[in-house]
Amino acid sequence: MAPPQYQDVSLSPTTDSKEDMDREIEAFAEHIRNLFADVAELSPKYIPVTKETFFSKFQDGVLLAHIINSIKANSVLISKLNTHIDATHLNGVANGETNHPEQTKAILEATNNLNICIEAAKKVAVVVNVAAEDFLRKKPDLVLGVMWQLIRSYLLSEVNLPSHPELIRLLEPGESLTHLIGLSNEQVLLRWVNFHLARSGSAKRISNFSKDISDSEAYILLLQQVCPWNKQRELEECLSPLYGVALNEKEARAAGVLQAAEKLGCRKFATAGDIASGHARLNVLFVATIFAKHIGIHLPTEDEARAAVQRLGEAEADNSMYRSRIIELEKTVAALNFDLEEHRAAHAKTISTFEEKLKTDTEGFKHSMDELRFEKEQESESWEEKMVDLQARFAALRDDQDKAVASQADVRTFIVSKLRAVKEMLAQHVKEAQADGGLEAKFAKLLGSSNNCAEDENVDALIDAAVADASAAVEFKPPAAGMEEELRNLSADLQGFVKDILDENRQQKKLITVLASKAEQHEKINNLLGDKIKVYSEAQIAANPIKTRDPKKK
């Protein structure tokens, strides 16, 4: 895991918030009281320091000199300072009251003291853009800025590798001691916190002492890691209730952390509100206090060092083996990459061929579909034309059939009328023949009649039979151009036949012979014409069936 980017607060200005400023004043005053509680020469003029007297205590520079010397001894020679300045003469300086001679003298002496302290402070801390007048006029932001730098230097003066060689364990992989030594005290303190967070097994890391630490999770893990074994039980009694407290209840969690820190003797500077609000300066000082009390890191013993060297040798051997395996794997990977490239090229070629074939087949299929669609359209048009033609032909056939039926009816009517005319003509000739007695007897004998066949009823019956035989003997033909001619010929034949009978009435013997012959011929003709009419009628009916319409179909 890459180290978090650190946000340095060493040069950050004091917040403009009066609430935060009051917290800093109280924290700094408490630190100064604890630091100089046993210094008799500062009491009671300078100690105790309170929130109300905080800025007044620094006007003459004496207390400031002792704070600087606490960081580095003899940085300021107290003997060179005027330690008998009357503080009452400096009270009006903040308001611009400098008319009294004793007041002017006190201001000059205090300014001299402060200049000496400021020069010394610059050597032990980062103190910039501040002058003696700022202390005399009690400017809060500048005075607190200097106090923050001095107290920070005091508390973090031991946070370095020379003072704590065990901090060598904070080295990251690949780092050198030079890099660790070059880190600022505050950066080392941040790395120390993250070291313990990593050792706890948590993924929590911080990059600042403000927002990242405001939920107290880092403090809980840090205290668990640095707590001495004989304080573990007391610490857990304070921290265990916090496990059920939500992260957003920051002040409640911070109060539990401060209670646990008090068990370890390092509850200083920060309050629950400072932790919850992420007050960077006071949190740095609080963490520095924990570091000074319980660093939680130790240098390895001789046995541990020997074991570490042995592990290092084993690790180097493993590294050599792994390095060889890596080289082999690299070769294998290179060979696989080569094969992969060949397969990829072959695959690309196959894909290209397939795409070309697919394109060609698609175009051919499209062309075939177009042709098939065109053929279907043409065939559809042809079928439509054929259907129209068939429908027309069917209608014509129906018309022809209707005409044929009508023509057959006309022919039958014509034949019947002609046959009736023949019947009437025959009946007339028969009546005429009846007048001749010899002809009647001969005619009756020829026809196989009895002697009384001359009666009207018998004669009429014989004539009707003859006419019926003649009608049956007439060959039925469909209407044609020569039908009337044939009927006329038939009528002429029948008239000739009757004429022959009348002639034979004059020539009795010759007529009887002719009639006998004619009778035989009539019988043959009747049989022959009956068969022909039957065959022809069946053929005509089969060829032109008279269809009946289905009443369900429209």
Image (tube, grey):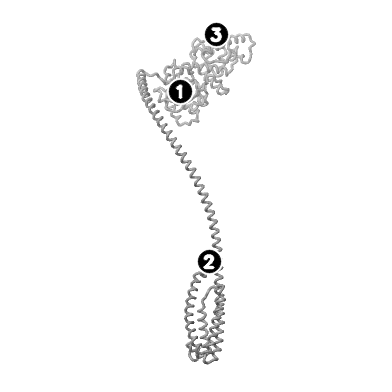
Q: Disc 2 to disc 1, how far (Cα)? A: 104 Å
Query: Callout 2: few (<14), some (14-19), or many (20+) C-alpha neighbours within 10 Å?
Result: few
Residue at the far right in the pictured view: 99
Mark 2: amino acid: Lys
Query: Callout 1: few (<14), some (14-19), or many (20+) C-alpha neighbours within 10 Å?
Result: many
Query: Callout 3: few (<14), some (14-19), or many (20+) C-alpha neighbours within 10 Å?
Result: many
Choose between 72 and 479: the one closer to the eye. Answer: 479
Q: Is residue 441 visible?
A: yes
Look at mark 2 in the image and give the residue it sits on: 552
- Return the mark for residue 446: none
* 3 or 1: mark nearer the eye: 1
> Can you tell which quarter of the image residue 13 is in?
top right
Q: Position of residue 160 (x, y in %)?
A: 46, 17
Local SS, label 1: helix
* 2 or 1: mark nearer the eye: 2
Q: Is residue 344 left or right of residue 374?
A: left
Local SS, label 2: loop
The reply to whether the C-beta atoms of the residues labelled 2 and 1 are less than 8 Å apart is: no
Q: Is residue 302 left or right of residue 107?
A: left
Look at mark 1 in the image and give the residue it sits on: 193
Residue at x 63%, y 14% (from the top left corner): 96
Q: Disc 3 to disc 2, how far (Cα)? A: 139 Å
Q: Disc 3 to disc 1, how far (Cα)? A: 41 Å
Choose between 33 and 337: the one closer to the eye. Answer: 337
Local SS, label 3: loop
- Return the mark for residue 81: 3
Q: Position of residue 105 (x, y in %)?
A: 61, 8
Image vertical order of residue 444 relative to residue 146, above or below: below
